[in-house]
Amino acid sequence: MKLASFVHEGAPGWGVVQDDGVLSLTHAWPDLRAALAAGAERIAQAVRQGGARVPAQGLQWLPPLAPGAKILCVGLNYGRHVAEAGRELPAHPSVFPRYADSFVGQGEPLWKPAASDRYDYEGELAVVIGRGGRHIPEREAAAHVAGYTCMAENSVRDFQKHNTQVTPGKNFERSGALGPWITTADEAGDPRRLEVISRLNGETMQRGSVADLIFPIARLIAYLSAFTPLSPGDIIATGTPEGVGASRKPPRFLRAGDVLEIDIPGVGCLRNAVADEPSPAGGIHV
């Protein structure tokens, strides 16, 4: 199944993607967090019972984010990306948070920040938690995964490197994208067989196999749940492969008019255009 969040006729909802649109299941559970907590089997039962069909035409796709979800991102998790960044292999995962308002959904414009010309692309596989827990052993981690989604994690490189804390460069408003939906774990299959591909204006810039992660998904879940409880709907971004714009010669950063695609066959293809961040009305807000 593919679980999507959307706005239709001014009202937010969520449902299961079908050929002709989305089967709305907002009547069964009010939001994705509640649905993910119920589990894929109960969602499938709700699908069989039916609901209102929302046509794809005119639909606004939202990031498939559960209300209040934690978004935990892992950096430097592909060996060749570590090498192109001139870093040593990490002994532990490098973790930083993302805020919900730093993401847009499928088809919505990304904002190239007004404060920087070093806005870089980063395609990633994101893991969505289904069953929550704390101190989750690696051997049990797969049972806590609801599914997977595509993430354009993206970075504002100069703000990222202002100090040792990368958080400012990772959280500019509308700098990242998430979606187009969550593909459930049973449909996606073994995540080690997945491939992350980033295309910029149709040109492949990144291509990496999830099997090459330095810290595999099960280890990430165990590590993160050692210090924070994981809840249904929480998202873990697993890192980006080599080929980012900052490491190219000359560097290639995102600019208005670009189209970025994050394609993970078996999960989905996330597509967003880039626009300049609009000037704030009435001056700069602090």
Image (spheres, helix red, strand yellow):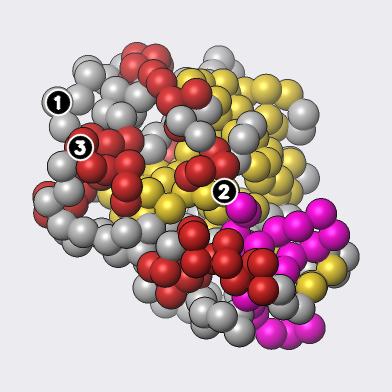
Q: Is residue 211 left or right of residue 252?
A: left
Whether residue 149 is visible, yes or no, is: no
Residue neighbourhood size for the residue with mark 1, other residues' Cα within 10 Å, grouped as few (<14), some (14–19), many (≥20): few
Q: Which mark is residue 138?
A: 3
Specify the amino acid type for callout 1: Ala
Q: Is residue 286 magenta?
A: no
Measured as percent of width and height from the top left, residue 108 is found at: 70, 59
Question: Which quadrant would the C terminus be assigned to in this image?
Answer: bottom left
Q: Nearer the viewer, mark 2 or mark 1?
A: 2
Q: Which mark is residue 102?
A: none
Residue 7: name its quadrant: bottom right
Whole-Å distance between the Cαs marked 1 and 3? Answer: 17 Å
Residue denoted by label 2: 183
Q: Which mark is residue 91?
A: 1
> Which stretch is magenta?
1-25
The answer to whether marks 2 and 1 mark residues whose Cβ atoms lie closer than 8 Å is no
Specify the amino acid type for callout 3: Glu
Specify the amino acid type for callout 2: Thr
Secondary structure found at label 2: strand
Measured as percent of width and height from the top left, residue 272 is found at: 70, 49
Q: Nearer the viewer, mark 1 or mark 3?
A: 3
